[in-house]
Image (cartoon, grey):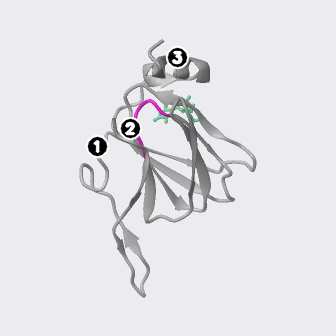
Amino acid sequence: MEAPRIIQLPKFLDDRGNLSFIEENNHIPFKIERTYWIYDVPGGERRGGHAYLNLQEFIVAISGSFDVVLHDGVKEMRYSLNRSYYGLYVPKMMWREIENFSTNSLALILTNGKYDVNEYIRGFDQFVSCKHGR
Ligand code: TYD
């Protein structure tokens, strides 16, 4: 099974401004089926609080900063995202929350499947049971 990891993206630094990009099955290890973004998050709010049965994600802080907190059923990992030239790869079956959004932050999320309510595990205890095959 793939592990969560920070992936550096190509970046073209230029006096006219910088440019980065993402190619599916190249910079990220999946085909992109859906893109969504989270924005205008009020101070102190958290997003997520779920796991996906099969979906993988790649999360980029296009603007501002936030923390992605992952739990693999045994331990918690925290990643601070604050630049648009890298992102966090999140494999399936990881509990994930996003918090500490800065003002005007923009979280871009790429994933390998259409929106499907049946993909969600919304209880942490259920997630841990699933993870340990109980
Ligand atoms: P939700 O997954 O609960 O947001 P988060 O986990 O970031 O807190 O989604 C919020 C609402 O948006 C929910 O009613 C479902 C809807 N939604 C879609 O319709 N399509 C999507 O691609 C996503 C991510 C959410």
- Residue 98's tag is none
Distance between the alpha carbons at the discs numbered 2 and 3 = 20 Å
Viewer-nearest residue: 100 or 32 = 100
The reply to whether callout 2 and callout 1 are in contact (CB within 8 Å) is yes
The residue indicated by pointer 2 is 56
Question: To which quarter of the image does residue 119 belong?
Answer: top left
Nearer the observer: mark 2 or 3; the answer is 3
Give the mark, 3 or 1, whose residue is nearer the N terminus: 1
Amino acid type, residue under disc 3 in the picture: Ser
In the rendered image of this protein, does residue 89 appear above or below residue 55? Answer: below
Nearer the observer: mark 3 or 1; the answer is 3
Horizontal and vertical percent for residue 81? 55, 58
The crowd level at tag 2 (other Cα within 10 Å; few <14, some 14-19, many 20+) is many
- Residue stretch rendered in magenta on the structure: 89-94
Q: Secondary structure at mark 3?
A: helix
The residue indicated by pointer 3 is 129
The crowd level at tag 3 (other Cα within 10 Å; few <14, some 14-19, many 20+) is few
The residue indicated by pointer 1 is 30
CB of residue at label 3: within 8 Å of ligand 1? Answer: no
